[in-house]
């Protein structure tokens, strides 16, 4: 990508989209198409088509699509699946039609089978049943990978799929029921601290393990891959270390400064027992993650507090 090429971040209001904008701006790309007023309804065929016809981006990062944690995936699987399927179809097709040179599509680590060999390798995709708590969303994400491969095969257009580990960071959705675990626990512990509550609920047994990656590291890797990777095979983006939910909850407790008790609610689902990515291919290309987990949590909490206008001592 040259600094003056037209770059479109589809979904620039999402956790990942915002991080992509930050990372592109830091690198002085001058033609990033970013104004939220300009973004069309990405689920709408005619809107997306007209937008691409008008804007003609050279490069596209497809970071759009509804996401949510394990709770949202159980509550609104149809919405999550439909929204992601529609956006993939519209954006990928319009990118091809209007001459986009390259597109990076973001899948999800839940695209891997539930009982996958760990750490998960790209060769394991579609070799077994998916985790039931997020089957609908995961199926939509797999469809996006397949669509990129099909467009590459039929039209020769350079579309690559990136599979990030569990992302977190500034700009995440912070809610109690629908968020991913880190955002949800930050909200719960922050509120509990302020209200002087003696305990909070942590869903599940605490034993599942996740590989958490700071979102700016994923954005950084995606720009690196836009410049250095061209293949139909998806590529994993992780940092090579996983922690248990009990451990991450304890870390968040320290970062937030909450001194109450963590009560594990086994009536809530655990989801996949372990999700860790084999990112050896990316690391062998020379890319390195930059943000240690603890530092990422501190930055995220600071952003949350500042954005919510509640500065605690
Ligand atoms: O982040 P999370 O919802 O994503 O949950 P998944 C991770 C783990 O944290 C699960 C536990 O074992 C949860 O039971 N957990 C503990 C909590 N307390 C909480 C809480 O308050 N909120 C939440 N949300 N979890 C998602 C998929 O699965 O991963 C999505 O559902 C997406 O489709 C995303 O792919 C990357 O890793 O379990």
Image (cartoon, rainbow, N blue to C red):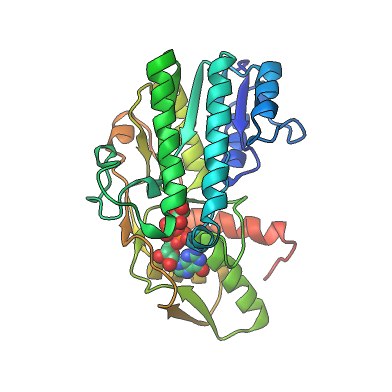
Q: Residue at x 45, y 16 (%)?
A: 157
Q: Quarter of the image holding residue 306?
A: bottom right
Name above or below for residue 123 compared with residue 95.
below
Q: How many marks?
A: 0
Q: Quarter of the image holding residue 244?
A: bottom left
Name the spot of residue 134 as percent of width and height, x first.
43, 55
Q: Quarter of the image holding residue 14?
A: top right
Q: Residue at x 44, y 73 (%)?
A: 268
Ligand 1 positioned in quadrant: bottom left
Name the spot of residue 232 as percent of width and height, x first.
35, 25
Residue located farthest toward the right when viewing the structure as drawn: 37
Name the spot of residue 269 as percent of width and height, x first.
41, 69
Q: Residue at x 57, y 73 (%)?
A: 189
From the viewer's perspective, tell me whether residue 28 is left or right of residue 241. right
From the viewer's perspective, tell me whether residue 18 is left or right of residue 73. right
Quadrant of the image for the C terminus?
A: bottom right
Residue 141 visible in rendering: yes
Name above or below for residue 126 compared with residue 161.
below
Name the spot of residue 294 as percent of width and height, x first.
46, 58
Residue located farthest toward the left when viewing the structure as drawn: 117
Name above or below for residue 225 compared with residue 273.
above
Q: Residue at x 57, y 51 (%)?
A: 79
**Foreground residue among 233 and 35:** 233
Residue 67 visible in rendering: no
């Amino acid at each position: 990508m040259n600094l003056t090429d037209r770059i479109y971040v589809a979904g620039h209001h999402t956790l990942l989209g915002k991080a992509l904008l930050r990372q592109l701006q830091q690198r002085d790309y001058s033609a990033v198409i970013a104004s939220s007023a300009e973004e069309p309804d990405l689920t709408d065929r005619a809107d997306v088509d007209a937008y691409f016809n008008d804007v003609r981006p050279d490069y596209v990062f497809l970071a759009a699509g509804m996401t949510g944690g394990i709770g949202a995936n159980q509550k609104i699987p149809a919405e999550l699946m439909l929204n992601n399927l529609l956006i993939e179809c519209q954006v990928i097709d319009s990118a091809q039609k209007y001459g986009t040179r390259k597109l990076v599509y973001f899948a999800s680590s839940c695209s891997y089978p539930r009982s996958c060999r760990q750490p998960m390798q790209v060769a394991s995709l579609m070799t077994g049943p998916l985790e039931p708590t997020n089957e609908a969303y995961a199926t939509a994400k797999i469809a996006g990978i397949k669509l990129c491969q099909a467009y590459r095969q039929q039209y020769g257009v350079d579309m690559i799929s990136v599979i990030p580990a569990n992302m977190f960071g500034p700009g995440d959705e912070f809610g109690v029921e629908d968020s991913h675990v880190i955002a949800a626990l930050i909200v719960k512990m922050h509120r509990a601290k302020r209200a002087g509550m003696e305990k909070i609920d942590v869903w599940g047994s605490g034993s599942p393990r996740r590989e958490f990656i700071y979102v700016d590291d994923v954005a950084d890797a995606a720009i690196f891959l836009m410049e250095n990777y061209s293949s139909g095979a998806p590529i994993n983006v992780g940092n090579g270390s996983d922690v248990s939910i009990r451990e991450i909850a304890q870390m968040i407790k320290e970062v937030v400064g909450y001194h109450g008790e963590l009560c594990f609610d086994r009536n809530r689902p655990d989801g996949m027992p372990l999700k860790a990515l084999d990112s050896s291919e990316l690391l062998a290309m020379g890319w390195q993650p930059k943000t240690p987990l603890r530092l990422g949590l501190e930055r995220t909490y600071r952003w949350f507090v500042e954005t919510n206008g509640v500065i605690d001592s």
